[in-house]
Image (cartoon, grey):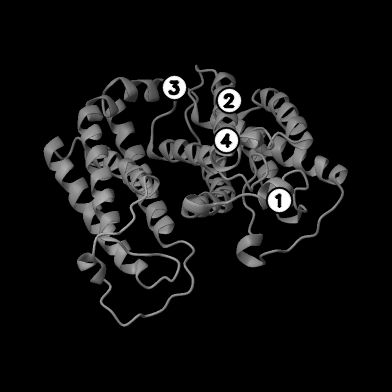
């Protein structure tokens, strides 16, 4: 029943994306103040004197997935044209509300142009969703998902977690494959630098442990007849590509492979080999191993010193237009390990038919 399996995943993705849009729009969530004007005064403000193409593009692209996921989440319960209208109206309401709230943040500027760009992006995404909705629910993509992975909303949640794990690789400031660093929230600036040789072993273990955990998570979602090893290797290639692209876009071109530090290289190689071997364990052992390694890596992330190999590059990192986006990637990276740990415990508590 591919249709039943496709909808929960689309709804989960839409809900997560809405939360990320809200966080990105209000980041860094500090310095709130009342300026004495209506929060909707921006609607009657003059058109911005200077319009930057990058700002317009980012506002459009930011809401394009919103429109697409909204239509996908509503299909097939809501007809395509009606779903398009819901996506457009809800995007307008969300954008208008968030711009109004931005009026109380000193680092944000509410603008009527931003609302128009957001609505345009949502319209483009919704139109794409209308065109591709049949392929998402009950179509080829849904059949591929059902053939490769077990059915159920809990499995869809796991697939969403894997997608968010790829998303965390977009933050250049995090260690390779690492997640769960709470220090920026609890005690900013904590930690002291140590010699690079001391850091290599820590980064290698964190990268390898997270890789093995992700591999074992993939194996818990895949159907027994499918090769979890192939899926895992494809996921690693995708993660490396995302990490490389992030450094190419967010940092200077000469820093495109600066993330591939000695510790990252060793952790990547050792993690892949260990993961391929661990996939032969029984299901209960795989879930337990994944949880233990994830906990150990998360603890070590919060104890690790600053990355001496990236220190110089990150000092030159001008976040600029990507400040809000980087805030979102940091939030997801911080929370991912703890959500994944709870999810592994949920899978361990539920016994599944090995036939899937």
Q: Nearer the viewer, mark 3 or mark 4?
A: 4
Instruction: Please give the label number shown on residue 237.
Output: 2
Is there a contact, CB below 8 Å, between mark 2 and mark 3? no
How many C-alpha atoms fall within 10 Å of the one at disc 2: few (<14), some, or many (≥20)?
few
Q: Secondary structure at mark 3?
A: helix
Please state if 129 lies on the left or on the right of 243 as rendered: left
| Residue on which the image places disc 4 | 248
Q: Is residue 94 visible?
A: no
| Residue on which the image places disc 3 | 148
Q: x and y percent of residue 11 in the render?
A: 32, 43
Rendered-image quadrant of the C terminus: top left
For the residues labelled 1 and 3, the Cα–Cα distance comes to 33 Å
Q: Name which residue lies at 36% across and 38% down.
A: 9
Please state if 168 lies on the left or on the right of 206 as rendered: left
Q: Name which residue lies at 53% across and 37% down.
A: 166
Rendered-image quadrant of the N terminus: top left
| Residue on which the image places disc 1 | 301
Q: x and y percent of residue 98 in the render?
A: 32, 62
For the residues labelled 2 and 1, the Cα–Cα distance comes to 23 Å
Mark 3 and mark 4 lie on one chain; the one further toward the N terminus is 3
Q: Name which residue lies at 51% across and 55% down.
A: 327
Q: Secondary structure at mark 2?
A: helix
Q: Which of these two is toward me, 250 or 270?
A: 250
Q: Nearer the viewer, mark 1 or mark 3?
A: 1
Q: Which of these two is toward me, 112 or 146?
A: 112
């Amino acid at each position: 029943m591919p249709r039943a399996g496709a909808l929960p995943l689309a709804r989960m993705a839409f809900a997560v994306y809405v939360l990320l849009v809200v966080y990105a729009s209000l980041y860094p969530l500090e310095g709130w103040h009342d300026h004495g004007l209506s929060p909707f005064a921006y609607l009657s403000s003059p058109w911005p004197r200077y319009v930057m193409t990058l700002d317009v593009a980012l506002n459009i692209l930011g809401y394009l997935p919103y429109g697409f996921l909204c239509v996908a989440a509503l299909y097939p319960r809501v007809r395509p044209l009606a779903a398009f209208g819901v996506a457009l109206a809800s995007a307008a309401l969300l954008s208008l509300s968030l711009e109004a709230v931005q009026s109380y943040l000193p680092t944000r500027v509410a603008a009527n142009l931003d609302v128009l760009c957001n609505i345009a992006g949502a319209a483009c995404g919704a139109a794409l969703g209308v065109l591709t909705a049949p392929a998402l629910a009950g179509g080829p993509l849904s059949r591929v998902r059902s053939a490769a992975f077990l059915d159920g909303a809990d499995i869809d949640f796991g697939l969403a977690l894997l997608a968010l794990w790829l998303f965390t690789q977009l933050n250049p400031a995090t260690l390779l494959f690492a997640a769960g660093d709470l220090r920026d929230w609890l005690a900013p600036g904590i930690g002291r630098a140590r010699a690079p040789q001391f850091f290599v072993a820590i980064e290698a273990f964190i990268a390898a442990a997270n890789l093995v955990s992700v591999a074992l998570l993939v194996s818990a979602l895949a159907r027994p007849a499918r090769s979890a090893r192939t899926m895992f290797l494809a996921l690693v290639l995708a993660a490396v590509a995302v990490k490389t692209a992030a450094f190419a876009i967010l940092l200077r071109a000469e820093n495109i492979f600066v993330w591939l530090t000695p510790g990252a290289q060793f952790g990547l190689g050792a993690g892949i080999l260990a993961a391929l071997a661990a996939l032969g364990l029984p299901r209960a052992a795989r879930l337990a191993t994944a949880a233990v390694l994830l906990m150990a890596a998360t603890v070590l992330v919060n104890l690790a010193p600053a990355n001496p190999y990236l220190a110089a590059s990150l000092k030159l990192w001008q976040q600029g237009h990507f400040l809000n986006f980087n805030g979102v990637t940091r939030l997801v990276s911080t929370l991912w390990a703890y959500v994944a740990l709870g999810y592994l415990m949920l899978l361990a508590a539920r016994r599944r038919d090995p036939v899937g």
